[in-house]
Amino acid sequence: MDVDLTDASWRKSSYSSANGGACVEVAEGFTGVQPVRDSKDPSGPALVFSATAWQSFVTAVRTGELDAR
């Protein structure tokens, strides 16, 4: 999936910790996809998930389906 993220506006996920640990940023405004990156490495690579896959992941996190080991 080739998505131009040059002008993406990133925001830190509300699930990221405040102490600078596991921080994830997402970019809004992309139809059908959800770009995600590590906030500690903003010039590094970003992952682009289908909107359906991202929503499934978020739902699994919210419902506790994923174990945080």
Image (spheres, grey):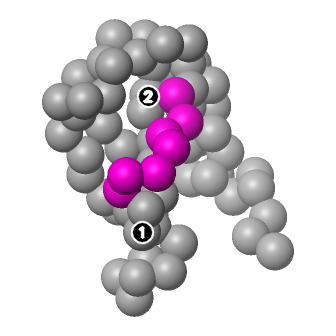
Magenta stretch holds residue 20: no
Residue 34 marker: 2
Q: Which residues are magenta?
A: 42-48
Which of the two labelled residues, at mark 2 and mark 1, occupies the earlier sequence position? 2
Along the line of sight, which residue is nearer the eye, 62 or 8?
A: 8
Task: Identify which amino acid the numbered label 2 is placed on.
Answer: Gln
Q: Secondary structure at mark 1?
A: loop
Q: In the picture, residue 40 is in which quadrant?
A: bottom left
In the rendered image, which quarter contains the C terminus?
Answer: bottom right
Task: Identify which amino acid the numbered label 1 is placed on.
Answer: Lys
Q: In the picture, residue 30 is in which quadrant?
A: top left
Considering every residue shown, the one lying at the far front of the view is 43
In the displayed structure, 33 sits above or below 36; it is: above
Along the line of sight, which residue is nearer the eye, 39 or 13?
A: 39
Mark-to-mark CA distance, 2 and 1: 19 Å
> Residue placed at 55% from the left, 18% from the top?
50
> Residue placed at 63% from the left, 31% from the top?
56
In the rendered image, which quarter contains the N terminus?
Answer: top right
> Residue placed at 76% from the left, 56% from the top?
66
Residue 63: where, in percent of width, then height? Answer: 64, 52
Crowding at label 2, few (<14), some or many (≥20) Cα neighbours within 10 Å? many
The residue pinned by badge 1 equals: 40
In the displayed structure, 4 sits above or below 9; it is: above
User: Contact (CB < 8 A) between labels 2 and 1?
Assistant: no
Residue 29: where, in percent of width, then height? Answer: 23, 23
Crowding at label 1, few (<14), some or many (≥20) Cα neighbours within 10 Å? few
Q: Secondary structure at mark 2?
A: strand
Q: In the picture, residue 32 is in which quadrant?
A: top left
